[in-house]
Image: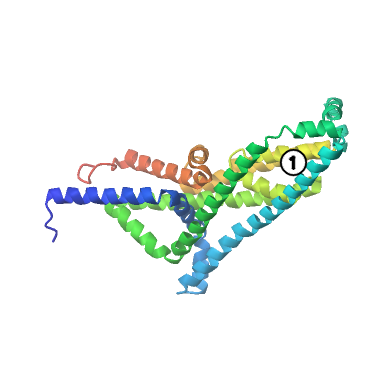
Amino acid sequence: MDNSTPAQLRARVALALAIALGALWIGAAFVPAILWAGVVAIAVEPLRRRLLARWPGHETLVACLITSAVLLIVVVPLVIALARAVVEAQGVALWLADARAHGVPVPAWVANLPIGSAQITAWWNAHLLTAAGASEQFARIDTDLLLAQSRTLTHDVIRRVVVFAFTIVVLFFLIRDRDTVVQQLERGATRAFGDAGGRVGRQIFASVRGTVDGLVLLGLAQGIIMAVIFAFAGVPHPILTGLLSGLASIIPFGLVAVLLVALLLLVIQGAVVAAIIVGVLAFVINFVIDHFLRPGLIGGTTRLPFVWVLIGIVGGVETIGLLGLFVGPAVMAALVLIWREWVDSGDIGTTTDEA
């Protein structure tokens, strides 16, 4: 039996809060990694259950397989992109050297532009056609600024690699010890907040799962569809452009930027009709996904009107970046659940007798 005095209880609570705040302060840089690991762990839970049904009692093996798969899915495209970026950078450097030595002739696509062709040609002949003109234009590039930006980018890349490595480590343990972690969270939430705490926790998990399905899976499907359309229309690098379309569609209104670039490339090639067809098809596909499929997947799971889902997504991205895509709707779902329970029974902040 606990014989602590009220003063000792208050001191114990204050000490626990101080330790918790100190731990949060020390590990603040890794909070996004932990949240990302939690989001991925929730998203891959159906796969984990299937693998455990096939190999019961092999939690460590299943955690290794899923973590390795996530690692490959992220690292392999990243390595390919970096290798491609190095090749492109070398190509740009060679092109700049040749341009300064010999000038840059007017590209053939300028003549195919529906408007502004004469003006662009005249400016190009005056500023880039000769070696002197090209050297003068390219000399305006601020080398010091580019070097400073490259250092900042390198530092940012290193920091993100460290965070990603920590995310992978945390993800392994979350998948392996998932049942224990969930039981502790449910027990802690129930002890601190009563039955409402458990319900809010389950709603947050469901919201993250629904957001992953509605954003990532539909974004992947949309990217594949757009890649096929781009390939038939003759857009350069259709697979890469389709992949970018899928990634951009995860962010509200993000697809518009990639689509405009693809349409501009078609117009530059003189394929105006193809650009119109691609634009119409992309609009129809995006309209169906954003107004029917995505609201059904996310809103049905989170029990939220899609306008609240949209507020959570946009506000989350604005506040904490890409992680906000998943955290934002989860927070909104928890808020709406608390509001509904308070409106229905008034049990927020009241005891059972008072209700």
Q: Is residue 118 visible?
A: yes
Residue 247, above or below 61: above
- The structure residue drawn at horizontal position 71% and vertical position 41%, both measured from the top left corner, is 282
Relative to residue 47, is residue 199 depicted above or below?
Answer: above
Quick check: 134 above or below 178?
Answer: above
Q: Is 12 on the left-hand or right-hand side of 19?
A: left
Residue 136 horizontal/vertical position (percent) = 78, 31
**Residue 300 at what x, y percent from top left?**
50, 47
What x and y, as percent, mark residue 47? 53, 64
Residue 103 appears left or right of 53:
right
Q: Quadrant of the C terminus?
A: top left
Label 1 SS: helix
The N terminus sits in image quarter: bottom left
Characterize the local packing of mark 1: few (<14), some (14-19) or many (20 or more) Cα atoms within 10 angstroms. Answer: many
Image check: 191 left or right of 247?
left
Residue 197 position, x and y percent, is 33, 50
Residues 23 and 287: in front is: 23
Total marks in image: 1
Tell me the amino acid under the disc marked 1: Ala
State the colouring used for the structure image. Answer: rainbow
Q: Which residue is mark 1?
A: 262
In the rendered image, is residue 226 in sight?
A: no
Name the foreground residue: 274 vs 345: 274
Residue at the spot 55% in from the left edge and 46% down from the top edge = 296
Nearer to us in this view, 6 or 331: 6
Residue visible at 26% across and 41% down?
Answer: 349
Residue located 46% across and 55% down the image: 38
